[in-house]
Image (cartoon, rainbow, N blue to C red):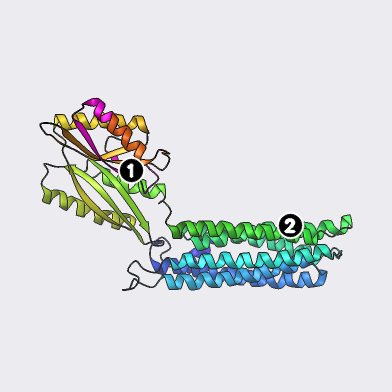
Amino acid sequence: MTQLLIHWFVKNPFDTQNPRTRNAYARLSGVTGILMNILLFAGKFLAGTLTGSVAITADSVNNLSDAGSSVISIISFKLAEKPADAEHPFGHARIEYVASLAVAFLIMFLGVELVRDSFDKILHPELAAFNWLAAGVLAASILVKLWLFLFNRKLGKAIDSVVLQATAADSLSDTMATGAVLISSVVSPIIGFSLDGYMGVIVALLIFWSAIGILRETLNKLLGEAPAEEMENMIRKHLLRADGVLGIHDLIVHSYGSGRTFASVHVEVDAKADILLSHDAIDNIEREVLLDHGVQLVIHLDPIVVDDHTVNTLRARVKDLIDTIHPDMSMHDFRVVLGQTHSNLIFDVVVPHECTKSDAQITQEIIRGVKAMDPSYFAVITLDRTYVSCPSHKTKMS
């Protein structure tokens, strides 16, 4: 069913980086959500009125808010479609994250209202008679919401949308919440005790949990979370298979919303290679990554000495030393300045987030280790913290 709707209403469904395609997916999700949730609101509100159940009535209002969330989703994607301008050179795609926050706060507000009504029902319980119409409406609602969860999850994954994934999570929490209300309407008349208010509290907690999950995921994206490992590996593999590339380090990826990804990286090449040829190869790689993966990549050319026995030997020894401090620590930009009284070993060390040692501790351990190799060696160290989840430095042999 979902695939059929995509085929009918989304032109070029596989061009998911295109803002028009993303807008079409969002419009399909939004219109479907509005229609379904308005129907559910009408059915539940009628059932809640007939039975006098505050949980069913509250659940109906939740569906009305879901329809409002769908409206927010449609508007946000339309705004995110706007091209970059002088004030927003990276585009407007992050509006989607702002919309996701709005949905989360709306859900939390409804949770607060439901808690208040539920406690009132606990303090002043009224036992409602079992009603087949109400039970049927709730059962149908569970099936519809479960389908909406699967529907929005598929659309969200297709275009990597935090708003649609939030909508899917909301639908799943609604499914559990409505299930709790259905249990209350069936069990309460049997045991002769009103579970309505207690189930209302459970529904509210589920709503809060859904909202917190949406907030956490959206705030992570706004604060600047580490890129997905798949994205890192894609860039690394593309770079390392290119001719002339000996290794890479200092990979940084910035996301300004789906379809607006920028990255920078240092690429190591043989210092004796023709600089014009190396530069041309780097330009080709940048174009390929943009065309194949939609990532705006900026590459810094980093020439390294590869045929000097002294440098290669010292590089290997320092690398072994660093491995003893932390196995995921890496080194790059290694060079040696030889002198009559002393020699400087100059290099950068990338420290993983898992390493609990301070910069001062790491620096002192490396200095002591280098001195142990030869008292005339001086280590000139620059410590970096990685911006990605994988080890920062990679060569064609690692």
Q: Position of residue 368 (x, y in %)?
A: 29, 30
Q: Can you identify the residue that label 2 sits on?
A: 180
- Magenta stretch bounds: 369-398
Q: Is residue 368 left or right of residue 122?
A: left
Q: Which image quarter holds the C terminus?
A: top left
* Label 2: which secondary element: helix
Q: Position of residue 319 (x, y in %)?
A: 28, 32
For image coordinates 75% across by 67% down, the residue present is 117
Residue 317: assigned label? none
Q: Is residue 342 left or right of residue 55?
A: left
Q: Is residue 12 left or right of residue 330?
A: right
For image coordinates 26% across by 38% down, the residue present is 396
Q: Is residue 161 visible?
A: yes
Q: Position of residue 74 (x, y in %)?
A: 50, 71
- How far separated are the C-alphas under marks 1 and 2? 48 Å
For image coordinates 53% across by 65% down, the residue present is 101
Q: Position of residue 220 (x, y in %)?
A: 47, 56
Residue 392: assigned label? 1
Mark 1 or mark 2: name the one nearer the start of the chain.
2
Q: How many marks?
A: 2
In magenta segment, residue 235:
no
User: Measured along the vertical axis of the image, is residue 329 above or below residue 199?
Assistant: above
* Label 1: which secondary element: loop
Q: Is residue 151 visible?
A: no
Q: Is residue 264 left or right of residue 46?
A: left
In magenta segment, residue 387:
yes
Q: Given the image, on which type of amino acid does mark 1 rest?
A: Ser
